[in-house]
Image: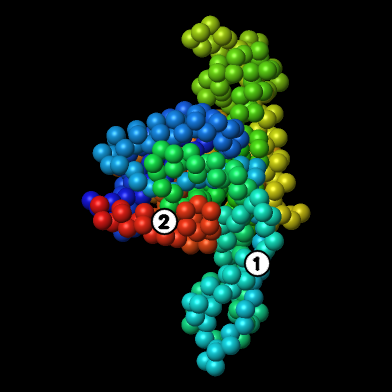
């Protein structure tokens, strides 16, 4: 097995850091070689707030993955999230001036450059420029215009920007443990790789990754990304509500949520005696109260997700409904509640496309990690500009890959 067959990722979340190493095969499926999971320290709502603690968490996670695989991790695909991320759709237009009027690959590069001409403040930088579709002389819906005749070529792109300082802090933590960065990927895009079906992407679907610190929303339509947003409300707020509402320490509230969490309370007080939940250290709470607190917060998150869907009639815009993933989607009954609140079909998305040492990975909590691997192995070209800008340059990226091949 050569080094350039290995694909690695680091999912730096608010509650956990997950590092995965896999062998890339000829198909889409990946053979998992090692998984390393460590509690996350030094992050809040997807942002680094303590570099030293964040580096230690990342280092522990990476070392565990290396020990399981027996291979050193040289570089990785890294997920990015946080309220600092913004997005917009932008159109680019160029003319085809050759006498034969044939569209070529360099015309695609020209029209993408035209789409990237947006006014970005000095404290922000482009993270992704993703082509959503092309148009030839006004004819929409063209997916691959190379070789077609045209006088004019248009492209519709989805542009994602992020705060330079926030991403630089994350990059500093990753490189501080000796790992080069292959690419920085917006986390809901990665999660979509592992939990969405092609027919859902084509019809129109909302992906909501409810993690520990943020809820990452991505809307797909006509096979491509349509809208992305990061909501600063997620599992942390659910645990905090439980702790405050029931007078529990935060760690105990988190344990109760994971062990007994449900959005299905016992209605109308039909039982004379409400079930009481107990844990090892002597704390006990009524099941009814726990469920009602969780249900109220999940309903709020679902309504915030609905506000991110463009258009007034989102039932027609996203007929494939809502796919919930992330650790908080493990709460019992969350998909049923989503259908009641939003009036859309809903399901819980479990990551697929991996085998081998992957026993822990078929869980919504690992949708981003698996998605980062699939993103890297499928050769996505999202025109990411971080690596060619302030984070190392073309030469440094080339030398990093050359060293791996030589080894």
Q: Residue at x 39, y 55 (%)?
A: 377
Residue at the spot of label 2: 396
Q: Position of residue 119 (x, y in %)?
A: 69, 61
Residue 151: quarter of image: bottom right
Distance from disc 2 to disc 1, alpha carbons, whole Å, reads 26 Å
Q: Which residue lies most toward the top here?
A: 282
Nearest the eye: 342 or 112:
112
- Compared to 330, does 148 lie above or below? below
Give the SS element for disc 1.
loop
Circle 2: element type: helix
The image quadrant of residue 248 is: top right
**x then y, percent, for residue 127:** 57, 54
Q: Is there a contact, CB below 8 Å, between mark 2 and mark 1?
A: no
- The answer to whether residue 229 is seen in the rendering is yes
Total numbered labels: 2
47 in relation to 129, above or below: above
Q: Position of residue 70 (x, y in %)?
A: 26, 39
Residue drawn at x 44%, y 43% is 175
Q: Position of residue 256 (x, y in %)?
A: 55, 19
Residue 117, numbered label = 1
Crowding around mark 1 (Cα neighbors within 10 Å: few <14, some 14 to 19, many 20+) is: few
Q: Residue furthest right?
A: 312
Residue 331 sits in which quadrant? top right
Q: In terms of depth relative to the viewer, which is nearer, 261 or 111?
A: 111
Q: Is residue 264 above or below residue 72?
A: above
């Amino acid at each position: 097995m050569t080094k350039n067959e290995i694909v690695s990722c680091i999912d730096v979340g608010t509650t956990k850091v997950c590092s995965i190493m896999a062998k890339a095969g000829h198909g889409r499926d990946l053979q998992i070689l090692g998984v390393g999971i460590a509690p996350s320290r030094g992050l809040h709502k997807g942002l680094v707030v303590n570099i030293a603690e964040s580096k230690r968490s990342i280092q522990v996670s990476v070392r565990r993955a290396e020990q399981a695989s027996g291979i050193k991790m040289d570089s990785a695909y890294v997920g990015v999230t946080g309220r600092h991320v913004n997005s917009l759709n932008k159109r680019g237009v160029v003319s085809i001036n050759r006498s034969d009027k044939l569209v070529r690959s360099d015309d695609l590069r020209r029209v993408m450059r035209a789409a990237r001409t947006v006014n970005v403040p000095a404290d922000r930088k482009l993270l992704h420029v993703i082509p959503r579709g092309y148009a030839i002389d006004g004819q929409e819906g063209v997916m691959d215009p190379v070789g077609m005749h045209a006088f004019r070529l248009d492209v519709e792109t989805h542009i994602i920007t992020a705060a330079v300082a926030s991403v630089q802090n994350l990059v500093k933590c990753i490189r501080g443990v000796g790992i080069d960065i292959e690419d920085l990927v917006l986390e809901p895009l990665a999660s979509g790789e592992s939990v969405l079906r092609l027919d859902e992407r084509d019809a129109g679907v909302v992906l909501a990754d409810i993690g520990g610190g943020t809820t990452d929303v991505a809307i797909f339509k006509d096979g491509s990304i349509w809208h992305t947003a990061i909501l600063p409300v997620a599992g942390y707020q659910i645990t905090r509500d439980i702790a405050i509402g029931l007078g529990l320490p935060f760690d105990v509230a988190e344990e109760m949520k994971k062990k007994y969490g449900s959005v299905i309370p016992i209605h109308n007080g039909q039982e004379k005696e409400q079930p009481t939940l107990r844990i090892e250290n002597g704390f006990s709470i009524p099941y009814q109260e726990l469920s009602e607190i969780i249900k109220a917060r999940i309903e709020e998150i679902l309504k915030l997700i609905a506000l991110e869907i463009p258009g007034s009639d989102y039932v027609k815009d996203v007929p494939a409904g809502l796919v919930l993933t992330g650790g908080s989607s493990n709460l019992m009954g969350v998909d049923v509640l989503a259908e009641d609140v939003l009036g859309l079909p809903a399901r819980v998305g479990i990551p697929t496309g991996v085998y081998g040492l992957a026993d822990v990975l078929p869980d919504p909590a690992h949708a981003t990690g698996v998605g980062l691997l699939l993103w890297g192995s499928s050769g996505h070209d999202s025109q990411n500009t971080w690596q060619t800008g302030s984070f190392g340059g073309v030469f440094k990226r080339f030398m990093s890959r050359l060293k791996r091949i030589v080894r």
